[in-house]
Amino acid sequence: MSPDKLDTYRSKRDAARTPEPVPEPGPLPTGHNDTFVIQEHHARRLHWDLRLERDGVLVSWAIPKCLPLDRKTNHLAVHTEDHPLEYATFEGEIAQGEYGGGLMLIWDRGTYETEKWTDREVKFVLHGSRSSGRYVLFPTDGKNWMIHRMDPPPENGLPPAAELRPMAAEERKRLPRDQEAYGFEFDLGGTRALAILGEGKVRFIGADGTPLTPESTPGLDRLDGLGKAAWGLPAVLDGRIADIGGSTVYMISDVLRLNTGDLLGRSYRDRRRTLDHLSLRDRHWQPTPWFPGDGKAVLQVAKDQGLPAVLAKRLDSPYLPGVRSSAWLRVPLNPGG
């Protein structure tokens, strides 16, 4: 009797403890070998899982830096266990302590075409909304494979990052009543700025779309290294350039794009969790702390520290560039603050 392709998958999961699909042993479903999914996996380290339908299962690779954008760079792809076809639609929270514990979000899904499939080489063409083009996977050492883009990258169809503008909050005199629906942040003052990361460099754009320079923004030159953060992936961040203890620090509050993927439609909660997993932490840049549902405590700390305001952001709110929205609220702590 031939082994079940999902035996390894089942052996690593307890159906009573995980929301993941865990089908019973039996005949595998018959498909068209043309479905793919890429899932953003907030496990111990943020990574992306590429899964290709093949003979009743999803053959899977974990890719720490997501798909390469051009032909110049290969990315590591770690071959993992086959997953059931039902996993192509799975999003959810895998409990900490369980295998793969953490948030799983669909990054992209669609169809693909197989050009070649052997033990030494898998060539395919993706047709997704975020991911498209010809790729090849090839093994290098045991479970370690590499993934290479074979054709020039297409236009991603997104407006230039420099045309994005920060989302703004409406002012209120007090915290919202339904605090459990919000995440709370400290308003640390300083200069609101979007950071555009790419090719190892960083550009800063002010709230009005004006490029920021060291001449216009003291201490900006200390933030040059941010361009090499986020594992070198292209990204657009939102935050404030503030003076923290006499040092210039870019306090990052949001991530709008990552590796050409537009995250604007995601909820604030999910964007913040993605940001936290990017491990953007240095003495000159770090994520702004956020506290789901804990507005009163945040307000008291802000008062004790003499901060200008507290921000309340709905956990389910998308990012609306250039819009002043009631989904985000700013509560000043002193007149004119």
Image (tube, rainbow, N blue to C red):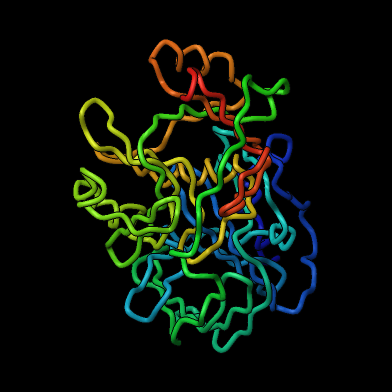
Kindly give the residue lying farthest to the front in the view shown. 336
Locate residue 258, reporting x and y percent: 47, 59
The residue at 48%/17% (across/down) is 334
The residue at 70%/78% (across/down) is 33
**Quadrant position of residue 81:** bottom right
Locate residue 280, reporting x and y percent: 35, 44
* Relative depth, front residue between 231 and 160: 160
Is residue 99 visible to us here?
Answer: no
Query: Eyeballing the image, is 178 above or below 10?
Result: above
Locate residue 161, reporting x and y percent: 46, 64
Instruction: Give the number of marks.
Output: 0
The residue at 40%/29% (across/down) is 188
**Quadrant position of residue 313:** top right
* Relative depth, front residue between 204 and 37: 204
Query: Eyeballing the image, is 263 above or below 122?
Result: above
Locate residue 113, reporting x and y percent: 63, 84
Query: Eyeballing the image, is 76 above or below 300?
Result: below
Instruction: Quadrant for the N terminus, please.
Output: bottom right
Query: Eyeballing the image, is 275 above or below 3?
Result: above
Task: Report the side of 57 relative to 39 (left or right).
Answer: right
The residue at 51%/63% (across/down) is 61
